[in-house]
Image (cartoon, coloured by chain):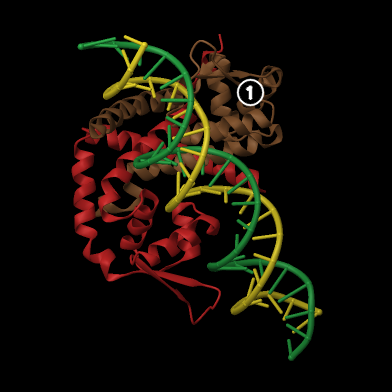
Chain colours: A brown, B red, C green, D yellow
Amino acid sequence: MDDFLTLENQLCFAVYEAGSQFNKLYSKALESFGITYPQYLVLLALWEENGQSAKELGEKLNLGTGTLTPMIKRMEASGWVKRERSTADERKVCISLQPKALEEKEAIVQKIATELKLCNIEYEEYKQLMKQLRVLRGKLNIYNKEKVK
Amino acid sequence: MDDFLTLENQLCFAVYEAGSQFNKLYSKALESFGITYPQYLVLLALWEENGQSAKELGEKLNLGTGTLTPMIKRMEASGWVKRERSTADERKVCISLQPKALEEKEAIVQKIATELKLCNIEYEEYKQLMKQLRVLRGKLNIYNKEKVK
DNA sequence: TACGATTAAATCGTACACGATATATATGTG
DNA sequence: CACATATATATCGTGTACGATTTAATCGTA
């Protein structure tokens, strides 16, 4: 009757599970580099475009300042990034990569690629999932944006 | 060149994003009931089978005792569940629903159903995603289990 | 039956994640 | 120029999440 109520049939839970599994996989793979999974996402964003304000970074990663500020400070303390107040607009903080983040890039990327290969995710599967998750993201985004109003 | 390195093309990030969007949607929908999204998942598991040990619950939800114990205690404090040491095996704690959790079930389920409907997720889309996420879960599970050894 | 190994929870430390609030800088309009 | 408004961060409080360690109960086997 209310089969749709079981954990097993909840899309939100399927996503939640996959998320925590990726979290574990990446955390373990990144452990030896001394970065966490969310910190790796920050590096990805900065490798793509070095020197971004906290706001820009937060928008790309869907993270508020309450999450980002302390995280970036930890990454600064461990030598991955640096934070500088913009001189043009003193409200802004510009976050950029330290040499360490550029030097270690290849090794980190390689490590992740190696581990992911072990999961045997097919290219078609990957592509399909990405496509469907983008559609889902679009719909959830519209909903969440509406609700803020 | 390394387009596969962009955030936009990372499966892990797509899952991460969808997860946090669901989190926001459910959190807002559940706010008036005084429960969080993870707590709602606990209720789902207990509505499905009332009276489970912390270990069983943790296995279904992929949560360790470091997460579950304090969460269940909060849910006990707010009157949703109760915790009782098993008399047969004093190591076990049996977690079961308080009347409040049974009384509010319909209202909670209705509220969630209403909000989800507003997202316009098609049945086919839902089914497809569930199917693919189950495959992904299987693969990530195998990987993560291997790594523990 | 004694005792080492296993199992179930609890506890601890660290790191997200989010909403709400505070603070400081910049901007727009009279 | 003055001042209300808007913007960018920072801070705070609460609640997950996870690995590691601790504690207590049970089990297996000599």
Q: In the rendered image of this protein, does residue B146 appear above or below residue A105? A: below
B89 above or below B146? Answer: below
Give left or right: position of B21 versus A101. Answer: left
Image quadrant containing the N terminus of chain A? bottom left
Q: Can the viewer see residue A100 in this picture?
A: yes
Residue located beneath label 1 in the image: A81
Q: Quadrant of residue B42?
A: bottom left
Query: Which percent across, then down, holds residue B24?
Result: 34, 39
x and y, in percent, of residue A131 in the image: 37, 23
Q: Is residue B6 left or right of B31 when viewed as pictured? A: right
Q: Residue at (39%, 51%) from the top-left corner? A: B38
Give the tally of numbered discs.
Answer: 1
Which chain does the numbered disc 1 sit on?
A: A
Q: Secondary structure at mark 1?
A: strand
Choose between A129 and C16: the one closer to the eye.
C16
Query: Residue B66: x and y, percent?
Result: 55, 57
- Quarter of the image for the C terminus of chain A: give it: top left
Q: Nearer the viewer, residue A60 or B143?
A: A60
- The front one of A104 and A116 is A104
